Image (cartoon, rainbow, N blue to C red):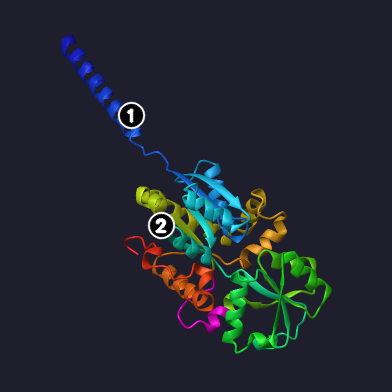
Amino acid sequence: MKRKMLMRMKKALVLAGVAATMLLAGCGEKKESAQVNVGSLKGPTSMGLVSLMDKNEAGEAGNDYTFTMETAADALLTGMVKGELDIALVPANVASILYQKTEGQVAVIDINTLSVLYMVSADTSLQSFSDLKGRTIYLTGKGTTPDYALQYLLEKNQISLDEVTLEYKSEATEVASVLAQNPQAVGLLPQPFVTAACTQNENLQIVYDFNEEWNAVSEDGSNLVIGVTVVRKEFLEDNKEAVRTFMEEHKASAEFANANLDEAAASVVKYGILEKEPIAKKALPACNITYIDGENMKQSLSGYLNVLYEMEPSSIGNSLPGDDFYYIAQGE
């Protein structure tokens, strides 16, 4: 009897040992988080990433991210060309230039920001876009997105460049200064400079939302696309699951920024994107932070790039990108 009991005890111990071994083996099979280097511009594109940055800092993200924030798109372009960045959030036209520069070695995975451009003035007589005839418009960046967007909207509203004066300034703060000094002045500014300027000068107000103005004249389903997210194709081919995870987490982060203004504003200040939470909270809803992928991304972006190409081919790298520029995940 004792012998049988001993045999049963030994058998139970063996089974317990096997179970423990299997459990440990299962733990050992857990896949390590992929290392992903992400670059973005200091501004709205980074504002849509702050929730993911917080999760990454807390060790709760699906990948192991290293985030780099730059003040100029050139630095991100260089990082992608050198392979120092795997994913980058860049201006839409810069993404096309990068595609040409790398001979097609990058692809767009999503649109992260629609128009952040607004026309601001203390002049309450401005009602429709046609009211800009005969006016001087102050803006920054000759030959950049704001400039091309303005010229496109002027053309679509039957206003020739001979009927307006475009006066370019080197910085957005200079435009804001002119607006503060001259109540009749009209300025084109991006967010969050719009919110900052209107906060400092209560007489200023938004007179034209470029997102709405673009949609009113668009005939091909395109949008005024400010920011897109690109990935190096080499990294994508080797890390499809990691890229897919990033896309899901990027979408969730963008949605968080739009739905949780207090928390998002605090993180925007925490990461040095803006200095003051009240301004960040006011600016967030106007930054048009979004997440668009798949066929909708392709339609919106390709139409926008076509507009830029017709206006100035060099603005997108002298030719339109091929279909391989648009990453459409399987099942979309």
Q: Secondary structure at mark 2?
A: loop
Residue 38 versus residue 118 in the image, above or below: above
The residue range painted magenta reads: 214-225
Contact, CB < 8 Å: mark 2 with mark 1? no
* Residue 45: image location, x then y, percent: 57, 59
Residue under numbered circle 2:
105
- Relative to residue 209, is residue 67 drawn left or right? left
Q: 4 or 97, which is in the foreground?
A: 97
Residue 79 versus residue 93 in the image, above or below: above
Task: Tell me the amino acid under the disc marked 2.
Answer: Gln
Q: What residue lies at 81% left-to-right and 78% top-to-bottom?
A: 183
Q: 95 or 245, which is in the foreground?
A: 95
Mark 2 or mark 1: whose residue is earlier in sequence = 1
* Residue 55: image location, x then y, percent: 53, 46
Work out which quarter of the rendered image holds the N terminus and state it: top left
Q: What residue lies at 60% left-to-right and 90% top-to-bottom?
A: 158
Q: What residue lies at 50% left-to-right and 68% top-to-bottom?
A: 316
Residue under numbered circle 1:
24
Q: What residue lies at 45% left-to-right and 80% top-to-bottom?
A: 220
Label disc, if present, on residue 47 of the rendered structure: none
State the separation of the CA atoms marked 2 and 1: 41 Å
Task: Tell me the amino acid under the disc marked 1.
Answer: Leu
Label 2 vs label 1, nearer the camera: 2
Q: Secondary structure at mark 1?
A: helix
Is residue 293 rendered magenta in the image? no
> Can residue 202 be seen?
no
> Can residue 244 be seen?
yes
Residue 303 versus residue 132 in the image, above or below: above
Outermost residue, top side: 2
